[in-house]
Amino acid sequence: MSNQLDNNNEMPAEFDFSGTQRGRFFREGTVLRLPVYLDGEIQIYLAARADAKEISFDRLVNDLLKKDIELTEALR
């Protein structure tokens, strides 16, 4: 039996959502934070810089990105 959708975009019969509640986990105003996956060598380099500066990894990355945005905007 295939789990793919039929040509008419109907849900396959083996999926039963009859006991579910629509919007149960929806929260107004929730901010979605997307994961960012760095190349291994970049992550190692940035982690070392964050340790040397005694700041968190995410703070260092955000600071670098903010500076890059400022430079990009200044060059426009």
Image (cartoon, grey):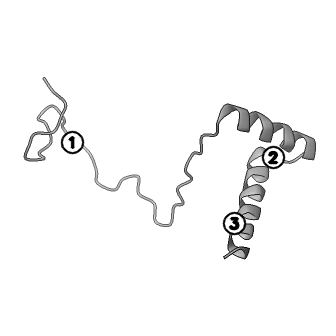
> What is the CA distance from the residue labelled 1 to the residue labelled 2?
42 Å
Query: Earlier along the polypeptide chain: callout 1 or callout 2?
Result: 1
> What is the CA distance from the residue labelled 2 to the residue labelled 3?
20 Å
State how many labels appear: 3
Q: Residues within 10 Å of mark 2 (few under 14, many from 20)?
A: few
* Residue that mark 3 sits on: 69
Q: Secondary structure at mark 3?
A: helix
Q: Residue at x 18, y 37 (%)?
A: 16
Quarter that holds the C terminus? bottom right
In the picture, residue 19 is in which quadrant? top left
Q: Nearer the viewer, residue 56 or 45?
A: 45
Q: Is residue 31 above or below residue 12?
A: below
Q: Which mark is residue 56?
A: 2
In front: label 2 or label 3: 3
Q: Where is residue 60 drawn, in percent x and y?
A: 79, 51
Given the image, on which type of amino acid does mark 2 rest?
Ser
Query: Earlier along the polypeptide chain: callout 2 or callout 3?
Result: 2
Q: Residue at x 86, y 48 (%)?
A: 55
Residue most extreme to the left: 8
Query: Earlier along the polypeptide chain: callout 3 or callout 1?
Result: 1
* Residue that mark 1 sits on: 17
Given the image, on which type of amino acid does mark 3 rest?
Ile
> What is the CA distance from the residue labelled 3 to the residue labelled 1?
45 Å
Q: Residue at x 15, y 27 (%)?
A: 2
Q: Is residue 21 above or below residue 48?
A: below
Q: Residue at x 15, y 42 (%)?
A: 11
Q: Secondary structure at mark 2?
A: loop
Q: Secondary structure at mark 1?
A: loop
Given the image, on which type of amino acid does mark 1 rest?
Phe
Q: Where is residue 52 drawn, in percent x and y?
A: 92, 41
